[in-house]
Amino acid sequence: MMWDDGYFFHGGGFMWVFWVLLIIAIVFIFQNMAKGNSSSTNESPLEILKKRYARGEIDEEEYEKRRNKLES
Protein backbone atom coordinates (compact mmCIF):
# COMPACT_ATOMS: atom_id res chain seq x y z
CA MET A 1 0.00 0.00 0.00
CA MET A 2 1.23 3.54 -0.73
CA TRP A 3 0.84 4.69 2.84
CA ASP A 4 2.97 1.91 4.34
CA ASP A 5 6.24 2.52 2.52
CA GLY A 6 6.32 6.31 3.02
CA TYR A 7 5.79 7.08 -0.67
CA PHE A 8 3.13 9.64 0.14
CA PHE A 9 5.41 11.62 2.40
CA HIS A 10 8.49 11.52 0.16
CA GLY A 11 7.19 13.55 -2.76
CA GLY A 12 4.80 11.33 -4.66
CA GLY A 13 1.64 12.19 -2.80
CA PHE A 14 2.52 15.76 -1.99
CA MET A 15 3.39 16.62 -5.57
CA TRP A 16 -0.26 17.16 -6.43
CA VAL A 17 -0.60 19.44 -3.39
CA PHE A 18 2.25 21.58 -4.75
CA TRP A 19 0.61 21.93 -8.18
CA VAL A 20 -2.81 22.71 -6.71
CA LEU A 21 -1.34 25.42 -4.47
CA LEU A 22 0.66 26.83 -7.36
CA ILE A 23 -2.46 27.09 -9.55
CA ILE A 24 -4.43 28.71 -6.72
CA ALA A 25 -1.63 31.24 -6.18
CA ILE A 26 -1.54 32.12 -9.89
CA VAL A 27 -5.31 32.58 -10.02
CA PHE A 28 -5.20 34.74 -6.88
CA ILE A 29 -2.47 36.96 -8.35
CA PHE A 30 -4.37 37.47 -11.62
CA GLN A 31 -7.59 38.27 -9.76
CA ASN A 32 -5.83 40.90 -7.66
CA MET A 33 -4.26 42.42 -10.75
CA ALA A 34 -7.66 42.61 -12.43
CA LYS A 35 -9.24 44.21 -9.36
CA GLY A 36 -6.46 46.77 -9.19
CA ASN A 37 -7.07 47.81 -12.78
CA SER A 38 -10.84 48.03 -12.50
CA SER A 39 -10.98 49.93 -9.21
CA SER A 40 -9.83 53.16 -10.82
CA THR A 41 -12.59 52.97 -13.44
CA ASN A 42 -15.23 53.32 -10.71
CA GLU A 43 -14.25 56.98 -10.29
CA SER A 44 -15.69 59.72 -12.43
CA PRO A 45 -13.31 61.75 -14.59
CA LEU A 46 -13.89 64.77 -12.36
CA GLU A 47 -12.92 62.80 -9.23
CA ILE A 48 -9.73 61.64 -10.94
CA LEU A 49 -8.97 65.23 -11.98
CA LYS A 50 -9.48 66.45 -8.41
CA LYS A 51 -7.11 63.80 -7.07
CA ARG A 52 -4.46 64.66 -9.65
CA TYR A 53 -4.71 68.33 -8.67
CA ALA A 54 -4.53 67.46 -4.97
CA ARG A 55 -1.40 65.36 -5.55
CA GLY A 56 0.21 68.22 -7.44
CA GLU A 57 0.38 66.42 -10.76
CA ILE A 58 -1.28 69.35 -12.52
CA ASP A 59 -1.36 73.04 -11.72
CA GLU A 60 -4.42 75.21 -11.09
CA GLU A 61 -4.60 76.49 -14.66
CA GLU A 62 -4.58 72.96 -16.09
CA TYR A 63 -7.13 71.85 -13.48
CA GLU A 64 -9.55 74.67 -14.33
CA LYS A 65 -9.16 74.11 -18.06
CA ARG A 66 -9.88 70.40 -17.81
CA ARG A 67 -12.70 70.87 -15.27
CA ASN A 68 -14.44 73.37 -17.57
CA LYS A 69 -14.08 70.95 -20.47
CA LEU A 70 -15.56 68.09 -18.42
CA GLU A 71 -18.49 70.17 -17.17
CA SER A 72 -19.46 71.49 -20.61
Image (spheres, helix red, strand yellow):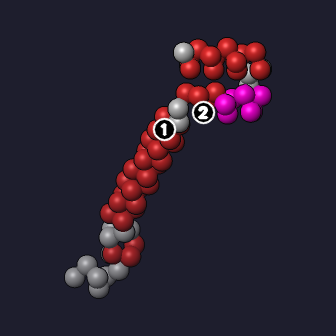
Question: How far is the residue under mark 1 from the one under mark 2?
Answer: 10 Å
Q: Are marks 1 and 2 in contact (CB under 8 Å)?
A: no
Image x and y of residue 26, in percent: 42, 49
Name which of mark 1 and mark 2 comes first in the sequence.
1
Q: Residue at point 58% right, 14% down?
A: 69
Mark 1 Cα within 10 Å, few/some/many (few <14, many 20+)? few
Q: Is residue 35 above or below residue 13?
A: above
Q: Quadrant of the rendered structure where residue 16 is?
A: bottom left
Q: Can residue 15 be seen at all in this image of the molecule?
A: no
The residue type indicated by label 1 comes to: Asn
Q: Residue at point 72% right, 28% down?
A: 53
Q: Residue at point 29% right, 85% down?
A: 4
* 61 left or right of 2 in image: right
Q: Can residue 68 be seen at all in this image of the molecule?
A: yes
Q: Main secondary structure of the magenta part?
A: helix
Q: Residue at point 39% right, 56% down?
A: 24
Mark 2 Cα within 10 Å, few/some/many (few <14, many 20+)? few
- The residue that label 1 is drawn on is 42
Q: Nearer the viewer, mark 1 or mark 2?
A: 2
What range is drawn magenta here? 50-56
* 21 left or right of 37 in image: left
Tell me the quadrant of the picture where the C terminus can be found.
Answer: top right
* 30 left or right of 60 in image: left
Image x and y of residue 34, in percent: 44, 41
Depth check, front residue: 58 or 6 = 58
The residue type indicated by label 2 comes to: Glu
Image x and y of residue 48, in percent: 60, 31
Q: Is residue 47 above or below residue 61?
A: below
- The residue that label 2 is drawn on is 47
